[in-house]
Image (cartoon, rainbow, N blue to C red):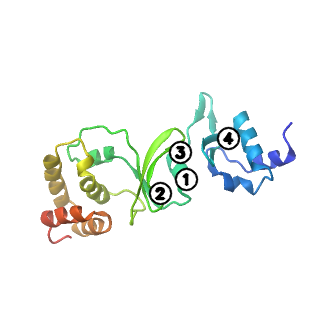
Amino acid sequence: MPTRTLDQLKKHLRSGRVYRREDLARWSHSIDRHLKELSAEGTLKKLRNGLYYCPRKFAFGTAPADERELVKAFLRTDRFVVTSPNMYNQLGLGTTQLYNKRVVYNQKRHGTFSLGGRPMTFERRLNVPKKLSPEFLLVDAVNELDQLAEDREAVLSRVSQKAREMNPRKLGRAVSLYGKHSTQKKFQSILPNAV
């Protein structure tokens, strides 16, 4: 039979939320035992060491953890942006390859980590946008040009066309904040007055 402390802990759990061990420790004196019990009964799902998910239950099973919630709990901050090389397709750069890669630009972690069975590549960056913008994606496409399985010259030619359609002030700011040195040089030759 569950202990009163375990019942108290359950009252603080919200369906769909991701928790760190230390978030839950304040409601339990035996947190490791309680986490093991809650995981065994399915109330919590262990995503990785110290990271737990309270599943949202539906008629056909449970929904996976929300990607943003998952990364936010892992990093202990909301200063990050999640993207993928597939996002470059939105810009009309002629990129056609499909990539099975999620990239998290952040200021804390670097490396590839599995979060809830999803591999994610964390890249530490000095500046991280609050949200994705076309300007950021264009700059990021040039930053990552060597990693793309595309014709680089063709992509760069389309980047040049797309850059001329964008607001030069916004693009110039994105280049200076998020562009690698080599990327900044490329944009200087494309739009000398904007950068």
Contact, CB < 8 Å: mark 2 with mark 1? yes
**Circle 2 or circle 3, nearest the eye:** 2
Mark identifier at residue 109: 2
Q: Which residue is mark 3?
A: 66
Q: What whole-number distance in Å separates the C-alpha atoms at marks 1 and 4?
A: 16 Å
* Left or right: where 82 falls relative to 189: right
**Circle 2 or circle 1, nearest the eye:** 2
Location of residue 33 (image quadrant):
top right
Secondary element at tag 3: loop
**Mark 2 or mark 3, earlier in chain:** 3
**Mark 2 or mark 1, earlier in chain:** 1
Nearer to the camera, 30 or 66: 30
Amino acid identity at mark 2: Arg
Q: Position of residue 161 (x, y in %)?
A: 15, 55
Nearer to the camera, 122 or 94: 122
**Does residue 125 lie above or below 155 as drawn?**
below
Residue density around tag 3, few if under 14, some if 14–19, many if 20 or more, within 10 Å: few
Amino acid identity at mark 1: Phe
Mark identifier at residue 74: 1
Q: What whole-number distance in Å separates the C-alpha atoms at marks 2 and 4?
A: 25 Å
Residue density around tag 2, few if under 14, some if 14–19, many if 20 or more, within 10 Å: some
Q: Residue at x 32, y 46 (%)?
A: 85
* Left or right: where 142 falls relative to 120: left
Q: Position of residue 36 (x, y in %)?
A: 73, 40
Secondary element at tag 1: helix
**Circle 3 or circle 1, nearest the eye:** 1
Q: Which residue is mark 4?
A: 44
**Mark 3 or mark 1, earlier in chain:** 3
Secondary element at tag 4: loop
Q: What whole-number distance in Å separates the C-alpha atoms at marks 2 and 1?
A: 10 Å
